[in-house]
Structure formats: C-alpha cells, structure tokens
C-alpha cells in the first residue's frame, strides 16, 4: 500500500515553521521548497548577507532524515572538497575512486555558494550530478539521493559553460536586502534567536515516501487546454523578444505546475498557477517582471471580451448615431445601407465599421430590411430603421452583460484560488486582481456608452406617417 499524500494543511504548517524568524523571505522560501518537492534546483541571485544560506538550510529542514551538504566555492576549489577524497586503497588496486560519504554525491539537499566560481572540471561534474542525479566514480556511476541543490551567486557569467550550468536551475530568484519596513524587525533579538534555530516538528517533515507520493500525484495532474494555450502564447512572445527557453525547461516547468496543484489537493493546474512561470523562463529580475506583466494582463481575460475589441464596436455605434443626428443629406445604397460619402473621413470609417459589425451584433433582427430614406434634407427616420438600430445595440448590450458575468466569475475564481494557494506570489495576485478590476471597469464604461447610444437612436426624429402617404414635396422623397 503506497504512502498517503501530505495534505495541504500539513504543508501549510510546515511552511509556517520554516518561515519562522525570517524577514521578507516568504516569496523566496516557498517557491524554493516547491522546486525541491518537484526535484528541481533553485538559484538565488543577490549580494552577500541576504540569508541565502539560511534559506537553503530551511529547505533541508523540510525533509526527514535528509543529509545536507554546504560549500563555498572559489577559483581555488578542488574536486575533493565537493566530491570527496580519493581512495588510497582503490589507487593501490589501480582504481580511481572517491570516498563520497559526507560529500555532495551523498547529500539529499545541498547549498553551493558562489556556484559559478568553480573551475570547468567541477562545473562539468556538477552538470551531470544536477541533471541526472548520477556521479562518475571511477569506472562506475553512482546513483545519488539528491533532491535539490540551492545555488547562490552575485552574478551570472555569460560564457558557454556558465550558461549551460545556469540552465540546470529551474528557478532563478532574486534576493535583496530587507525593506525599510522590515529593518526594525530584522534587528529584533527575539526574531534573531528564532532565525538561528527554527523549530520544525518531525511530524511535519516529509520522508522519502511522502515526497514520492506527491511526485506521483503531480504526474497524474492535468494541464488544461487553456493553460497549454497560454504557455504556447508565452513561448511565441518570448521568441519574438529574442529570449530562448529550452524544451527541457518547458517540460520541467510543466511538472512544477503540476506539483503546485497536487500539493494543494487539486487534480488539475489552474491558469493562476502560471504566476510561477516568470522565475522559470526569464533569467533576471527585469525580464521576470516583463513576463509577469504579460501574464497578469491576459490571465482570466478571454479575447472576445477584451476592452479594446469591444471599444471598436461601441465607437462604431457612437459614430453611426452622430452621423444620423447631424448629417443634412442622407444617401443609401441599393442594399439599404447608409453611404458616408458626405461625411468627414474619420466618420466615414466609423460608419463603415458599424455596417461591418451589423451582422455580428444583430443585423439578423431586421436592420437590412429597415425603412430607409433615399434622399432627405430633413433628419427624419422610419420606425423600422430606429427599431433596427436599437435592436443592434440591444444585442451588443446583451454581449457586454455576458462579458461582465465572465469577468466576475474569473474574479471569484482568482479569489478562491488565492485563498488556498501555498506558492502564490502576493505581487502577482495583486496584479491579476488589478487587471480584472480594470477590465470590469472598462466593460462597465462601455456598457454605459452603449446604453447612451441606444437612447440616442431611440430619440432620433421620426417620419410622421399617417394612414395615407402625404403628397410629394419638392426636394423631399420617402423610401418605398
């Protein structure tokens, strides 16, 4: 019988214990632990003295009976410091082997500071260890128990080997000094004592069986079509900006998203889980911010209810109403559509757009069959014409109301997700809320404009048609 999957409540309590005593490090610790649960590595980029090593030790405390290894690399670091000393007995037997017990190949969680300062021989050995969880020891390969490596650096090199090694870290997290608000808390003695020795209940820690149960649950999680579509759009957008993201990284990212869902007890990834994407696909803080803004502006908003698209429709009706209110001479073509040859170019285009949209917004309700004036100096319209216009606007208003309901549902969905999310970045959640609120406000304003346009069409001067047609008047003709 397999091990039970750790519940969300247990993980939440574990996270709270790990965060105890730390100041403004929630947004770094949580995704780092999620990466470890998914078997991925995290790179912390920032100046010295920003609790990078403390964060790595907290990640280690999340796992029961997990061996820990820590080392600061310099340009003088030799392989023995990471991988263990050579075995004298093996050398006597013409074998080149190391004693790896207590060193990196024997560790479950490791912290490597100034990770890019090692020489190429060490970096090449690390590449295989990080990606394959294997270490070449003499003539054979050792299978390593490595769960996750937390690396730290002040600067990412731009050489080819450095870039290959950089790609092994799925998460790239910026770590900076605490804010002015957190500075007083940072200096508090009680908090400093908590930071030195956080207490983690062994019952909360994850053993290997519990971790593998989470991995199996993550593999069973579904990536819905809308999530795949967003990832495809993002990939195309990044390519357009000249930013290359390897296929291997996209696959690892998909597993990370599944782990986020599984750890919260969900069977499918949510669109909102994509808030984890920026730190996985962008190399630095500036590029990550650009990706986060791109996502926040699109998540929860369907193309159909995008305010710029609907604005064009409302503007077309505004222009149509203006033309019909102010034009001295109205001329219609054979199909009964209003010609705009006598109007200014901008009004001409707006009117043409309104005609193009007539079929989409409701021309089937009788707009093309409305009573028309072939030529009239007076601004008077038949009842069928006015009814056709108001019917078209009513169709638009129905669509706007539906869009507003969709946005309201998405806002509710965001709040429900955020209330139970373990790994969400608060800044991303705030940006998504702001975007959805802005969309709702914009659609509400367009709804008000459409209602005003409908009232304007309804108030157009009407032809005074009695039981019999009046005698023709010079320079005035009525439609058939």
Image (spheres, rainbow, N blue to C red):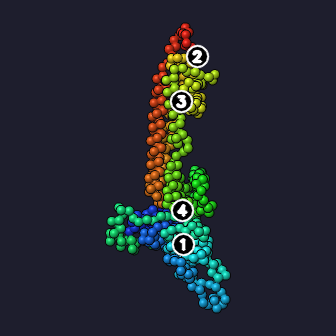
Question: Could you say which is closer to the camera, residue 75 or residue 433?
Answer: 75
Q: Position of residue 180 (x, y in %)?
A: 36, 62
Mark 4 or 2: in front is: 4
Q: Position of residue 312 (x, y in %)?
A: 53, 36
Judged from this view, the residue extending furthest toward the bottom is 92
Pick whichever of labels 2 and 3 is earlier in the sequence.
3
Pick whichever of labels 1 and 4 is earlier in the sequence.
1
Which corner quadrant holds the N terminus?
A: bottom right
Residue occupied by mark 2: 479
Question: Could you say which is closer to the camera, residue 268 or residue 24?
Answer: 24
Pick whichever of labels 4 and 3 is earlier in the sequence.
4
In this orientation, does residue 79 appear?
yes
Residue occupied by mark 3: 347
Labels in figure, total: 4
Q: Residue at x 51, y 26 (%)?
A: 323
Q: How many residues crowd mark 2 within 10 Å: few (<14), some (14–19), many (20+)?
A: few
Distance in Å between CA atoms under marks 4 and 2: 68 Å
Q: How many residues crowd mark 4 within 10 Å: few (<14), some (14–19), many (20+)?
A: some
Which corner quadrant holds the C terminus?
A: top right
Residue 116: numbered disc = 1
Considering the numbered disc 2 on the image, is that residue within a helix, a strand or a loop?
loop
Position of residue 199 in the picture relative to residue 311 (left or right): left
Distance in Å between CA atoms under marks 1 and 2: 82 Å
Distance in Å between CA atoms under marks 4 and 3: 48 Å
Pick whichever of labels 1 and 2 is earlier in the sequence.
1
Q: Is residue 471 above or below residue 463?
A: above
Q: How many residues crowd mark 1 within 10 Å: few (<14), some (14–19), many (20+)?
A: many
Distance in Å between CA atoms under marks 1 and 4: 15 Å
Q: Residue at x 61, y 68 (%)?
A: 160
Residue 283: numbered disc = 4
Mark 1 or 2: in front is: 1
* Tags 4 and 2 touching, CB below 8 Å: no
């Amino acid at each position: 019988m397999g091990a039970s999957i750790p519940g969300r409540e247990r993980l939440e309590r574990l996270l709270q214990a790990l965060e105890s005593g730390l100041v403004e490090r929630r947004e770094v610790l949580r995704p780092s632990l999620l990466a470890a649960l998914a078997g991925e590595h995290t790179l912390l980029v920032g100046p010295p003295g920003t609790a990078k090593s403390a964060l790595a030790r907290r990640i280690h405390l999340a796992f029961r009976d997990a061996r820990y290894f820590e080392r600061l690399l310099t340009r003088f670091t030799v392989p023995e410091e990471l991988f263990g000393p050579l075995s004298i007995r093996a050398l006597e037997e013409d074998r080149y082997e190391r004693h790896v017990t207590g060193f990196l190949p024997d560790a479950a969680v490791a912290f490597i500071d100034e990770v890019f300062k090692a020489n190429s021989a060490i970096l090449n050995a690390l590449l295989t260890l990080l990606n394959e969880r294997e270490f070449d020891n003499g003539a054979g390969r050792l299978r390593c128990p490595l769960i996750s490596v937390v690396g730290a650096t002040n600067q990412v090199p731009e050489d080819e080997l450095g870039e290959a090694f950089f790609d092994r870290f799925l998460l790239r997290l910026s770590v900076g000094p605490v804010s002015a608000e957190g500075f007083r808390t940072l200096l508090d003695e009680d908090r400093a004592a908590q930071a030195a020795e956080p207490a983690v209940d062994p019952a909360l820690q994850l053993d290997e069986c519990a971790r593998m149960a989470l991995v199996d649950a993550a593999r069973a999680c579904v990536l819905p079509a809308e999530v795949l579509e967003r990832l495809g759009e993002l990939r195309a957008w990044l390519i357009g900006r000249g930013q290359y993201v390897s296929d291997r990284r996209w696959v690892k990212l998909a597993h990370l998203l599944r782990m986020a869902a599984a750890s919260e007890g969900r069977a499918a990834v949510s669109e909102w889980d994509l808030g984890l994407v920026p730190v996985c696909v962008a190399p630095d803080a500036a590029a990550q911010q650009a990706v986060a803004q791109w996502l926040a502006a699109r998540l929860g908003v369907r193309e159909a209810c995008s305010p710029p698209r609907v604005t064009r429709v409302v503007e077309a009706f505004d222009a149509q109403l203006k033309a019909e209110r102010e034009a001295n001479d109205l001329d219609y073509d054979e199909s009964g559509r209003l010609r705009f040859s006598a109007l200014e170019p901008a009004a001409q285009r707006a009117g043409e757009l309104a005609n193009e949209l007539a079929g989409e917004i409701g021309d089937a309700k009788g707009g093309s069959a409305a009573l028309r004036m072939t030529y009239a100096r007076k601004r008077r319209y038949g009842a069928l014409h006015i009814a056709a216009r108001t019917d078209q606007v009513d169709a638009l208003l129905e669509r706007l109301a539906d869009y507003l309901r969709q946005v309201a549902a998405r806002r509710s969905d965001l709040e429900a997700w955020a209330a139970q999310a373990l790994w969400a970045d608060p800044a991303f959640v705030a940006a998504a809320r702001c975007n959805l609120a802005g969309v709702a406000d914009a659609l509400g304003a367009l709804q008000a404009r459409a209602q005003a346009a409908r009232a304007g069409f309804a108030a157009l001067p009407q032809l005074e048609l009695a039981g019999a047609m009046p005698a023709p008047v010079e320079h005035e003709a009525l439609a058939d």
